[in-house]
Amino acid sequence: MPYRAPSAADLLAWYDRHRRDLPWRAAPGQARDPYRIWLSEVMLQQTTVAAVGPRYARFLARFPSVEALAAADWEEVAEEWAGLGYYARARNLHACARAVAAAGGFPSDTAGLSALPGIGRYTAAAVAAIAFDAPVVPVDGNVERVMARLHAVETPLPAAKARLSALAAAFMAEPAARARPGDFAQGLFDLGATLCTPRRPACALCPWQAGCAARAAGIAADLPRKAARRARPLRHGAHFLLTDEEGRILLRRRPARGLLGGMLELPGTPWRDEPWPEAEALPHAPLAAPWRRLPGVARHGFTHFELEMVLYAARHPGGPPPGGEWREPAAAAAAVPSVMRRLLALAAEAP
DNA sequence: CAGGCGTGGGT
DNA sequence: TACCCAAGCCT
């Protein structure tokens, strides 16, 4: 196959034919709403398009504008974000909305965007390019993979990041890219998501196949190389399902920062390397009661450790213990992170 | 720079 | 099953 240098024009032509129709994507020629683009970018951080789709629509229906989001209480935002993970995103999203609303709108350049909470190098470039057509190339995992293959970069990530960013940025020297920075960025995303995939890339369909060094060398599927991961330790916790006479469940709010910061949970012990014998666990219960251990365990995988939890149940008529609040079972499940839903599911299975 | 920080789907 | 992976950010 004759060599043909990868060009922005070729990618844009491919994008015009094969672009994905996504909820946060304005139709060609349609006005672009910075709020919607920013929201989608934050939701999509380390989160799949499939997972974001329905949550994006729901979030937008509840908070239709940056002003509406800014005016909301944290408790509402937390509930709406529950289950999406990486909860610092929701905290930063809320803080960012308040800053933007106070300023009267979003900055249109990467420097201004980067100064906002939860907006780093990637998201600043993405919003600037997609919402404002600033001549920048956002570099996410897709773009790193495409660049690593295009130029057969064998240096493992993350060491190769700077070089891959420079290779991506070089495309903005082309007038075709400068004319449509937002579409160029999204073309790179779509190429990475649909053809230049992590395994089994569909090189035969790629608009850049004739200029791809990794394809020429037969190593496309092996790139980008990555540093080895560390093993995840197993940790243990014990949690408490307290219900009132109407079957409502006791929840409490976690500290504002750190793991699951600011989210609701079932009361429990800290999570540690050793299992919790009953005598050590019960002092962590929200109150003294005839706690009974439910059969089985609930497991949940976090990014950096695996968690195994046991569950104790008891009934407590009257008001909630200090620091807690009653929730109907369905509302509780909707308001808590997924790790806590595992416990609710375990309780639902129990006899 | 390395590590903390979630979750669900694919293989 | 046990990984790997996804439109990263912050410290």
Image (cartoon, coloured by chain):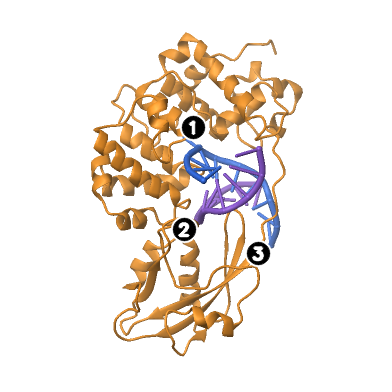
Chain colours: A orange, B purple, C blue
**A197 left or right, relative to A264:** right
Q: What's the mark number on residue A260?
A: 2
Residue A54 can be seen, yes or no = no
Marks 3/2: CA–CA distance: 18 Å
Q: Are marks 3 and 2 in contact (CB under 8 Å)?
A: no
Marks 1/3: CA–CA distance: 32 Å
Q: Please give the chain letter of the residue carrying mark 1.
A: A
Between disc 2 and disc 1, whose residue precedes? 1
**A37 left or right, relative to A296:** left
Nearest to the observer: residue A55 or residue A10 = A55
Q: Amino acid at mark 3?
A: Leu
Residue labelled with disc 3: A234
Residue at the extreme bottom of the image, as rendered: A290
Indicate the position of residue A99 as horizontal and vertical percent values.
30, 39
Q: Residues within 10 Å of mark 3 (few under 14, many from 20)?
A: some
Q: What's the mark number on residue A122?
A: 1
Indicate the position of residue A346 as horizontal and vertical percent values.
50, 74
Q: How many dots with numbers? A: 3
Q: Please give the chain letter of the residue carrying mark 2.
A: A
Q: Is residue A17 above or below residue A75?
A: above
Q: Please give the chain letter of the residue carrying mark 3.
A: A
Indicate the position of residue A128 as horizontal and vertical percent values.
39, 26
Do pointers 2 and 1 mark residues of a single chain?
Answer: yes
Q: Amino acid at mark 2?
A: Leu
Q: Residues within 10 Å of mark 2 (few under 14, many from 20)?
A: many
Quadrant placement of the N terminus of chain A: top right
Between disc 1 and disc 3, whose residue precedes? 1
